[in-house]
Image (tube, rainbow, N blue to C red):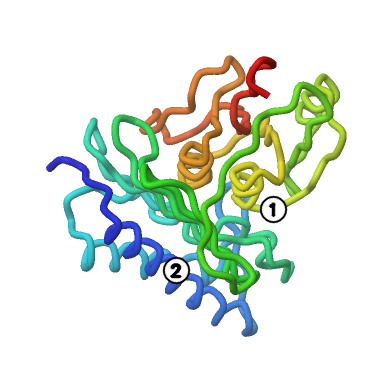
Amino acid sequence: MPLEITPDLVDTVRAIALEAGRAILDVYHSDFTVRHKGDRSPVTEADERAETLIINAIRSRVGDHFPIVAEEAAEAGSIPEVGDAPFWLVDPLDGTKQFVNRQGEFTVNIALIEHRLPQLGVIHAPAIGATYWGSAQGAFAETEGAPARAIACRPLPEKRLVAVASRSHRNVETDSYLASHDVAEIMSSGSSIKFCLVASGRADVYPRLGRTMEWDTAAGHAIVRFAGGTVTDMAGIELLYAKPGFENPSFVARGAPPVPPGRR
């Protein structure tokens, strides 16, 4: 079945993300138990409740046309064969460390992949009331209770970049990358909100040197992509999906190409 990203589909995925966010907040505002997975990363009832909600909602409201690769199911060994067909990537609670520490920078990430690229992405940050989404129809945001607005990456400046780096996973390699560029300001943020800062023009570059999984990046990649920016590996090749093990290389999200001098 060919993939068609309609306004109705975008609205449906946004609604699912918001419902998952409400389920997460129910747990967030309660006394919850933290467990640890094999890689020692934390997991809570909120991760599992949101993932079940998202999977069931996609199947009931969108259909069973495409496989769903979701973080907690994948960690448990349940990974569908995606082949070359479109498929969903779901991270029901990105930024579980922020969730556990009662910080607001955690998100729901839902993306739809075709031709190994994200064609639709929704990121919802329930604790701060922010939602971002991107598709061929454009990139948009709803924040601080204001109506939805179009967003766009700003053109990359020649110097004095504004960078955003991971609050929990910043490492020596990231610091070396930042030191090798003319960076005037470094913002820190958790979860996939870092992509949204680039997509909305608040940051120019987001480097991530280290291990991530495809469900961590696909929704943010879509939003940056349709806001006019890029997400590439360190060689400048666009990040692709359905890789072996669904594991990403190091990558950099960047704003829009610089404006040529004669067109300023």
Name the side, left or right, on which 144 lies relative to 182. Answer: left
- Cα separation, mark 2 vs mark 1, equals 19 Å
6 up-or-down from 81: above or below: below
Q: Residue at x 59, y 74 (%)?
A: 145
- Which is more N-terminal, label 1 or label 2? 2
38 up-or-down from 209: above or below: below
Q: Which image quarter holds the C terminus? A: top right
Across and down, in percent, residue 144 comes to 64, 70
Instruction: State which quadrant residue 177 falls in.
Output: top right
Across and down, in percent, residue 111 comes to 40, 49
Q: Residue furthest bottom?
A: 30
**Foreground pick, 57 / 151:** 151
| Residue picked out by circle 2 | 50
Q: Residue at x 69, y 62 (%)?
A: 98
Name the side, left or right, on which 191 lies relative to 82. Answer: right
**Foreground pick, 4 / 232:** 4
Q: Which image quarter holds the N terminus? A: top left
| Residue picked out by circle 1 | 190
Q: Residue at x 74, y 41 (%)?
A: 165
Q: Residue at x 52, y 35 (%)?
A: 228
